[in-house]
Every structure is written in C-alpha cells, then in structure tokens.
Image (cartoon, rainbow, N blue to C red):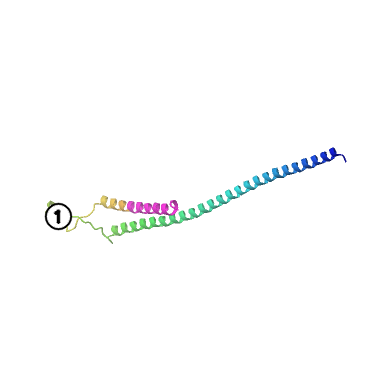
Amino acid sequence: MKWYHQALIALFVMSLAGGLIYSANHYHGLYKDEQDRADKAESLAQLRLDTINDMQVRQRDVAALDEKYTGELADAKSENEKLRADIATGKRKLQLNATCPEGDAARASSLGDGEGPRLTADAELNYFSLRDGIGRITKQVNYLQDYIRQQCLK
C-alpha cells in the first residue's frame, strides 16, 4: 500500500474516532440534562407532596380547634339561657351592689314593700345580652389566639 493510502486510512480512522468522541460527548450532555431535569421534577413533586401533607394536617388541626371552640360557645350560650330561665322562674336571683339615694329611703319605707333595689326589665334584658356578648367574644378571642399559636407560629 502506498503511503498516501495509509495516510487516507489514518485520516479516515481519526475522523471516525473524532466523530464518535463528539457524538458520545453530545449524547452524554443530553443524558446529563435529562437527568438534571428528572431530579428537579422529582424534587418538586416531593415538595408538593410535603406541602399537601402539611396542609391536610393543618386542616385537621383547625377543624379540631373549631370544633372545640364551637362547643365552648354553645356551652356558654346554654349556661346563659339556663341562668336566664332560673331567674325568670325565681330559682335564682340577680344580686346587685346598689344603694338607694337618701331622699328615696323615706319614701320606700312608707310604701312598706321592703324590697331591695332591682333591675328594670330592660336592664335585665341588657344584662343577659351583655353576658352573651362577653362570653362569645371571649371564646372568639381564645380561638383566634390558639389558631395563631398552633397554625401561624409553626
């Protein structure tokens, strides 16, 4: 074989080897890109799963908290209604820390009824409305404080 044939064969083999090296490098780069993309997708899927699980736990916690305070509100309301009924039937009485003015003392003794100071019907109704409102607001504030401690500060 002549030297130029050998040179051509050597050139062809080197070109073929170079092409193979280039192709291997190119496909290896594509493989790495796909592997990185797959790793990112798997990481994102795990992050989403963790987020969903955390949201489910929080929803259960909030539902339990809501159930607790809804029950407490209902208990406070029924307690207030029982007190109202007991006062209406005379089973219990509202105690007042009140004194009659000096001028009314002589007049009250001349009437001879001997009763102490009492609330008017409107004042008694307002008392129960205020008591309901205070109980409801107290339970709502406690609920919100628990919600903040258990959900927002986690």
Q: Is residue 51 above or below residue 15?
A: below
**Outermost residue, top side:** 4
**Outermost residue, front side:** 3
**Outermost residue, right side:** 1
Q: Tell me what residue is drawn at x 58 percent, y 50 percent.
A: 43
In the rendered image, residue 11, in percent from the top left (x then y), is placed at 79, 39
Look at label 1 and name its amino acid: Ala
Residue 5 vs residue 64, the one in the foreground: 5
In the rendered image, residue 154, in percent from the top left (x then y), is placed at 45, 53
Q: Which residue matches tag 1? A: 108
Relative to 111, 126 lies left or right = right
Relative to 45, 150 lies left or right = left
Residue 77 vs residue 39, the one in the foreground: 39
Q: Tell me what residue is drawn at x 82 percent, y 39 percent.
A: 7
**Outermost residue, bottom side:** 91
Instruction: Name the magenta segment's main secondary structure.
Output: helix
Residue 144 vs residue 71, the one in the foreground: 144
Q: In which quarter of the image is the N terminus?
A: top right
Specify whether residue 143 is painted magenta.
yes
Q: How many labels does the image show?
A: 1
Secondary structure under the numbered disc 1 in the rendered image: helix
Residue 64 vs residue 134, the one in the foreground: 64
The magenta span reads 132-154
Specify whether residue 147 is painted magenta.
yes
In the rendered image, residue 44, in percent from the top left (x then y), is placed at 57, 48
In the rendered image, residue 24, in percent from the top left (x then y), is placed at 72, 45
Relative to 58, 111 lies left or right = left
Badge 1: residue crowd in 10 Å (few <14, some 14–19, many ≥20): some
